[in-house]
Amino acid sequence: MQDTAPVEKVQYPAVFVGSRYARQLDPPVSVFKDSIVMANDADFEHRYNALAALQTAIAGRIPPYTYQLVNVHEADALVARTRAELEAKANWNRASDDGEAAPEPEPEPPPPDPDPDPIYLQRAMALGRKAFAGQPAQLRRLERALGIVERGGVVERHDGPGWRVPADGWYGYWVVDGRTCTCPDHNLNHARYCKHTLAVALVRRARELKEGVRLEREPVPQPMPDPAWLREQDRQWHDYLDDRDVHFAAARGVL
């Protein structure tokens, strides 16, 4: 069919959508959905031949239409989309005829930088692993904290100090100033750092690393441990590594 887009078979019932843009006509844009709904290939052949004959009859006298075959349920959307495209073209040409510069489309705003930046989050995680070396319980909390951060669960409050960190099946816990948490692990087990405070610490540390600054934080005393305690911590650290490797292997289906 003359001036017809390549016809690809679509799921019946189907219709033709005709469109035309001609600057000499008023209005210059015309888009319509054909009234004939085709239910099978025989209907398609009959309507296709009829439209082709119409195109031949008007050739050279008025601008022809372009026809697209579409499922009947998608026809209205195609009509709206085609009309918008042709009217944008008409407006552009109208502005050019009037000697006006057509407005440039507004550029898409760049996507916001991820917070925290994944690169600096991993650096913060490496520092955390180093700080808790030999402390399997804290290392496990740290790994869980990383999962919380990667899922975007740490939300800083804008109406006051503090952070909200989600919990399974619960709205979440509040971490105030990155040190005090409302979770049972922090309050009942007397954990210096629960996974929620560690999640906040990872976010803050990643930001510091990216900005090249060091935020003020509560000093943490570091007493000198005795050698026997260090040996025991080293043994626990290796137990933790073995346990982690077993879990990773199970997750990969190796075990």
Image: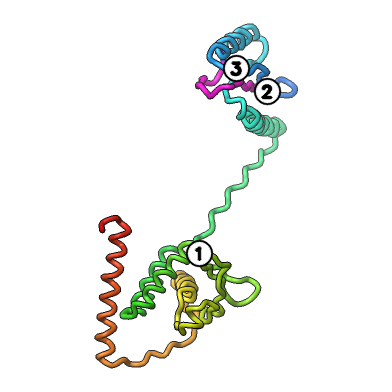
Nearest to viewer (mark 3 / mark 2): 3
Q: First in sequence: mark 1 or mark 3?
A: 3
In depth, the one of 172 and 202 nearer the eye is 172
Residue beneath the point at 26% across and 56% down:
254
Does 20 lie within the magenta span? yes
26 vs 94: above or below:
above
| Whole-percent x, y for residue 197 in the image | 49, 76
Kind of residue at disc 2: Phe
Q: Which residues are magenta?
A: 3-21
In depth, the one of 204 and 242 nearer the eye is 242
Quadrant, the N terminus: top right
| Whole-percent x, y for residue 127 in the image | 37, 75
Which residue is the site of mark 1? 115
* Mark 1–mark 3 distance (CA, rounded to whole Å): 53 Å
Q: Are marks 1 and 3 in contact (CB under 8 Å)?
A: no
229 vs 169: above or below:
below
